[in-house]
Amino acid sequence: MNLKQLEAFVQVAEGGSFSKAARELYLTQPTISAHISALERELNVRLFIRNTKEVGLSEDGRELYKYARKIIDLEYQIQEHFHVNEDAGKRSVTIAASTIPAQYLLPDVLILFKERYPQERFKIIETDSTEVVTHIIEGVADIGFTGTVLEKKYCRYIPFYKDKLVIITPNTPEYQALKEREGQGIAWLKKESIILREEGSGTRKEAEKQLKKAGISMGELNIIASIDNQETIKRSVRQGMGISILSQLAAAEEVETGHMLAFSIPEADEGRDINLVYNKNGHIGKTIERFVRIVEEVYGIREE
């Protein structure tokens, strides 16, 4: 195998398309296919599962991706160190982000970053907080944004934003009456149908922690669904399926337009930290340094 084959493999894996990989690498699609076929023959495995709509990694493909991504990153680091292709604009920054920072905080950072460093390109992986940290440790992503601190042996976390959680309900007379009595506790939650984010979500972990401070355990709640898409959660709440606990950022528009009500959680602190995270044992290149500076400029940085 060689670097060209691995570059083609990584581009197809990240873009989910042979034609897109060909455009990114300025090659023909048959050349990309030939590189992938050569890898599959040499390793005696099937790297991709193909259907009419998309191209996905096989189990063997996912294993190879972990190694190939590290090799390509090392190639970039060598080029960066010796100023090779400094103006070529081929560097692609992979960012893993959990839902809240990906949708509500990262866009402002990327806009300013792109203005300052137009040669940089991005790949955004939106996933849960656990996977963000896994991607950083395994070298799949260069930089991560997460609301949960899971591991500190390999990772450095830099908090830059306080995210407050709120209880969201439909805007109906029943909940309007509860809103008028807000401040008298949230024991009424135990009688409600609750919709939560999925296991592994930083929002769910923080909700469990804050409810415990308020004297309510998860076992006392009637949890009817776990949903990984917060837009689906909000639509479900608006339609009366149940109530939920989400980031104040995520609920702001619906609360402002009067489609939902938001309740504070008693005993909650000022909010959970949203962190920029990177592998402190890896290569700390210019890209990470630039990102830290831009995040500091947009939101401020509170060193751990």
Image (spheres, grey):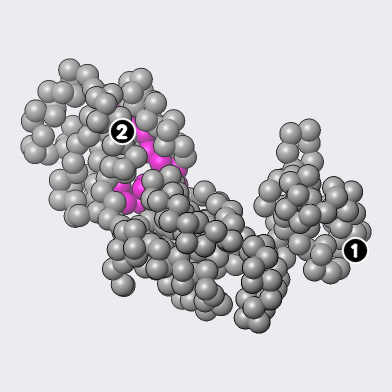
Q: Which residue is pictured at 19% across the width and 55% down the height? A: 269
Which numbered disc covers residue 253?
Answer: 2
| Vertical side of 301 occupied by 122: above or below | above
Give the x, y percent position of residue 16.
71, 46
Q: Can I make out residue 99 in this image?
A: yes
* Magenta-tinted stretch: 192-208
Which numbered disc covers residue 55?
Answer: none
* 275 with respect to 283 (left or right): left
Crowding at dot 1, Cα within 10 Å, few <14 / some 14-19 / many 20+, comes out as: few
Residue type, numbered disc 1: Glu
Give the x, y percent position of residue 241.
36, 23
Q: Can I make out residue 37 in this image?
A: no
- Location of mark 1 (residue): 42
Give the x, y percent position of residue 175.
19, 24
Of the 4 image quadrants, the one containing the N terminus is bottom right
* 262 with respect to 115 (left or right): left
Which quarter of the picture shows residue 179? Answer: top left
Mark pair 1, 2: CA separation? 53 Å
Q: Which residue is pictured at 29% across the width and 51% down the height? A: 163
Which of these two is toward me, 92 or 1?
A: 92
Q: Which residue is pictured at 78% across the width and 36% down the height? A: 51
Residue type, numbered disc 2: Glu
